[in-house]
Amino acid sequence: MGRRPDLVRGVALIATQGNVHLVSFNIGDLMAVASMLMWAGYTVLLRVRRDPLDIAELLTMVCGFGSSTCFPGWHGKSRLMTCG
């Protein structure tokens, strides 16, 4: 566990060819990192779940919640594309 910060620094140093100060992040990069962390949390929590749902019911519920949270973005994008 103690070597992980060294490994991350080493990968960053190699990936940037020694110019670590030139690294910059935009909002898309941060959103990608946030989604990776959420997916990691989801997969860990999925193993310890204690609900009575079988896998088909759980998948339906996850897809339904995911679609409902994405719907405002889809709706807004389609409105922008048709108004142009």
Image (cartoon, rainbow, N blue to C red):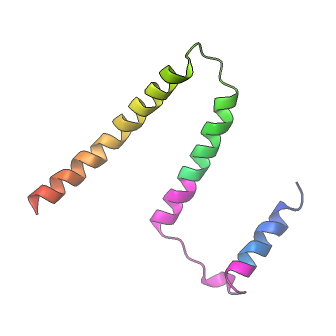
- Left or right: where 50 falls relative to 83: right
User: Which residue is most to the left?
Assistant: 83
Magenta stretch: give its range.
Answer: 14-34
Residue 40 shown left or right of residue 80 in the figure:
right
Q: Is residue 68 above or below residue 50?
A: below
Q: Position of residue 79 (x, y in %)?
A: 16, 52
Q: Outermost residue, right direction?
A: 2
Q: Where does the N terminus fall, quadrant-wise? A: bottom right
Counting from the top left corner in percent of width and height, residue 34 is at: 55, 53
Left or right of 55 in this view: 21 = right
* Residue 27 picture location, percent across and down: 46, 64
Q: Quadrant of the C terminus?
A: bottom left
Q: Please, what is the dominant secondary structure of the magenta stretch?
A: helix
Looking at the picture, does residue 67 appear above or below residue 10? above
Is residue 42 positioned above or below 21 on the image?
A: above
Residue visible at 43% across and 33% down? 63
Question: How many numbered marks are there?
Answer: 0
Q: Is residue 26 magenta?
A: yes
In the image, what residue occupies the spot 39% across and 30% down?
A: 64
